[in-house]
Amino acid sequence: MSRSGWLKLTCAVLALIALYRTFYVVDETQSAVVTRFGRIVREVRTPGLRAKWPIDVAWRLDNRLRLFDPGPAQLLTRDKKMLQVEAYVCWRVMDPERYVRTVADSTMARRRIYDLVRSQIAAELGKVDLADLVSTEEEDLQLEAMLQGVTLACRASARDTYGIDIGDVGIKRLVFPEQNLESVFARMRAERQRIARQYRAEGEQEAARIKAQADKQKEEILSEAYRVAEATKGRGEAEAARLYAAAHSADPQFYKLTRTLQAYERMFGDDTTVVLSGDSELLRLMTHGREANR
């Protein structure tokens, strides 16, 4: 190829390169910032085919809301409890010019967001105790209020510094670090055992009190029953003595005969053998008959 041919080819290539660098397309989800030698020339927010000088650079930025996971971080609460916090951040580009001037690309933007969010969460965690973040009582929880404060603080700082709008900051996982879990579980077991011992001691104390009260009531009931029984027995014996006296007064001989026969009945059973002398007073009724009653 002749020299003039090479020159034409070179001009054509340069023209194509210039044409390629002159036109650019802005998508519906994008905005663009045009810079010339590092200085911002203009900002484009409407989609379509746009033109610029070949020496200019078009920074096309995604305007959609993006989710960023900064990864786990170990932070301290006010009561010196170490926690592993895994947060997430929803963000988007709000001010394209400031964004390009301060961070330029999404990788640097994520670094800035990471530093900002981590420092703000660490500051807020240092103001609350662990019980304010994890509790069975809903009214004691302050996690939601803490995250709202983190979001507002990060949003204001990111807008003013980087042109980034932070829509939300949340925590998807809040746990103890792996190396602390066993000691935490040991303390939890010790605390539960202490509570169990306390409950058992209180139960034994209450059982002893109830037993003592029952024993006292038992003694009172038995004493009252014995008193009533003795009084009834006394009245019965008095009535029996009165009846015996009345029967003796009515017919002394018949009374003596009856009492003697009752004595025989109690003494002599089917298998009873009694050996007495012939002049025994006990046998006079059997040996002398009615004369013994006289």
Image (spheres, rainbow, N blue to C red):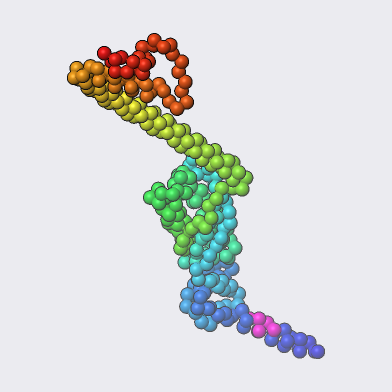
Q: Is residue 272 above or below residue 177?
A: above
Instruction: Give x and y (percent) for residue 234.
Output: 26, 21
Instruction: Give x and y (percent) for residue 6.
Output: 76, 86
Instruction: Please tell me which residue is depicted at 66% across the width and 84% down the height of the picture.
Output: 16
Give the overall secondary structure of the magenta segment.
Answer: helix
Q: Is residue 209 magenta?
A: no
In the picture as drawn, the residue positioned furthest to the right comes out as 1
Instruction: Give x and y (percent) for residue 79.
Output: 49, 40
Relative to 265, is 241 on the left or the right?
A: left
Q: Is residue 186 above or below residue 133?
A: above
Instruction: Give x and y (percent) for residue 21.
Output: 61, 79
Number of numbered discs on residues = 0
Q: Quadrant where the C terminus lies?
A: top left
Residue 126 visible at all = no
Instruction: Please tell me which residue is depicted at 58% across the width and 65% down the height of the picture.
Output: 105
Residues shaded magenta: 13-18
Q: Is residue 16 magenta?
A: yes
Q: Quadrant where the N terminus lies?
A: bottom right
Q: Is residue 214 above or below residue 277?
A: below
Instruction: Please tell me which residue is depicted at 33% across the width and 22% down the height of the picture.
Output: 261
Which of 152 and 205 lies nearest the eye of the viewer? 205
Q: Quadrant of residue 68?
A: bottom right
Relative to 2, is 207 on the left or the right?
A: left
Which of 181 and 105 lies nearest the eye of the viewer? 181
Instruction: Please tell me which residue is depicted at 37% across the width and 21% down the height of the picture.
Output: 264
Residue 7 visible at all = yes
